[in-house]
Image: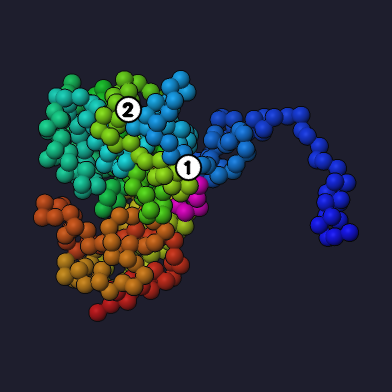
Amino acid sequence: MSGASVAMTILALKPAPARHSMRWEDFIMTDDSFTDPATIAASMIGISDAETGDVAPHVKPATTYEYGKGYSYYRGTAPGLEDTERVLARLEGGEAAMVFASGMAAATSLLVSLGSDTHVVAPETMYWFLRNWMIKDAPAFGLSVTLYKNGDLDSIRNAIEPGKTKAVWVETPANPDWSITDIAAAAEIAHAARAKLFIDSTTSPPVITRPLELGADVVMHSATKFLNGHSDVLAGALITKEKNDLWECVNHARAGFGGTLGAFESWLLLRGMRTLDVRMQRHSENAMRVAEAMLSNPAVSHVLYPGLSDHPGHEIAAKQMKGFGGMMSIRLKGGADAAARAVLRTKLFRNATSLGGTESLIEHRGPVEGPDSPTPQDLLRLSVGLENAADLIADLEQALGQ
């Protein structure tokens, strides 16, 4: 008898596995079984495939659907988008989420949905491109903007125009000085004025901060950054505490402006989020070690990192954050010239914009923002990645050396 015949005989004699009487659906975790963000992100709770039991989400690239199936055309919504949005909503503890083609698409869709003849208050220090849009482009949509001093609650109160202000925008930690705003206190101020509180939580994703639990109405992310975590997808996200008329307007704006995230990008974002918790732990640990090392570097005049006990917002950050994230900045005693030289001398830190990837990045931020930037010209912004912390410190020390 040939080897193949023997094998076939053995297989024929082997008893078939017993069939379970329970269905696969009975084993799927229900939506309210687990609430910890780390568990939600790693397990992709709520999107298991009931037919196959796949443990990894699928790419769902269709752009159009047969009528009567619940979907129509991709620009509105689609199964792959909804997979990512369900996970995001669970992560932030919100009622619903929407993903966009970029963080700017998410932020601007939210702001224009407030309607014309609307006043918004926003921080002096924030993501520069959005700040520029608010000041220069928002008036064309009927929006006026007043800037307040970051972290200063009285400044927020004074910036509000009773009866006209519809939203308070907060970015915390704020790019690139990493100032901290008390989210719960800002929510009280906004709601007392019958305004919404919008939080840009890009650098503090939900395994670190959950703004909706602190009183925010909508959370925004440039999902390109820490949510995805691999510098390989451009995406944005909004998560709302509750579905309401504003949320419907945002949904209409996304479809109308064509800001919907692509199917493959949505899948990449979903895949990246599976490691969100462990990545953020390493980002935070590395950034703390780098910040502490830079305190004693003779070339450094200031270390801006909310994890340091002497940071002005440290106590509030410790209250509303679980870890302090991977973003920090240093200011150099040698001024702008020293900063310009340092970014060209690093070997491990890459001289590039953006943040939140596994790789460490360094940027001379002021010149990038332009002549109107309030950012000090001696400031270097660091996105601290997942490399060995000792290697990162050694790289900065040699780059800052005389």
**Residue that label 2 marks:** 251
Q: Is residue 116 above or below residue 175?
A: above
Q: Secondary structure at mark 2?
A: helix
Q: Where on the picture, by quarter, is residue 182?
A: top left
Pointer 1 or 2: first along the chain: 1
Position of residue 250 measured from the top left corner of the image (x, y, whole percent): 30, 28
The residue that appears at 45% across and 52% down in the rendered structure is: 280
From the viewer's perspective, is 18 left or right of 188? right
Question: Can see residue 380?
Answer: yes
Position of residue 227 measured from the top left corner of the image (x, y, whole percent): 41, 46
Question: Can see residue 309?
Answer: no
**Residue that label 1 marks:** 59
SS majority, magenta: helix
Q: Where on the picture, by quarter, is residue 386?
A: bottom left
The residue that appears at 32% across and 23% down in the rendered structure is: 248
Q: Quadrant of the N terminus?
A: bottom right
Magenta-colored span? 274-280
Q: Nearer the viewer, residue 300 or 388?
A: 388
Disc 1/disc 2 C-alpha distance (Å): 22 Å
Residue at the farthest bottom position: 402
From the viewer's perspective, is 258 left or right of 30? left
Q: Is residue 372 above or below residue 116?
A: below
Position of residue 241 measured from the top left corner of the image (x, y, whole percent): 39, 28
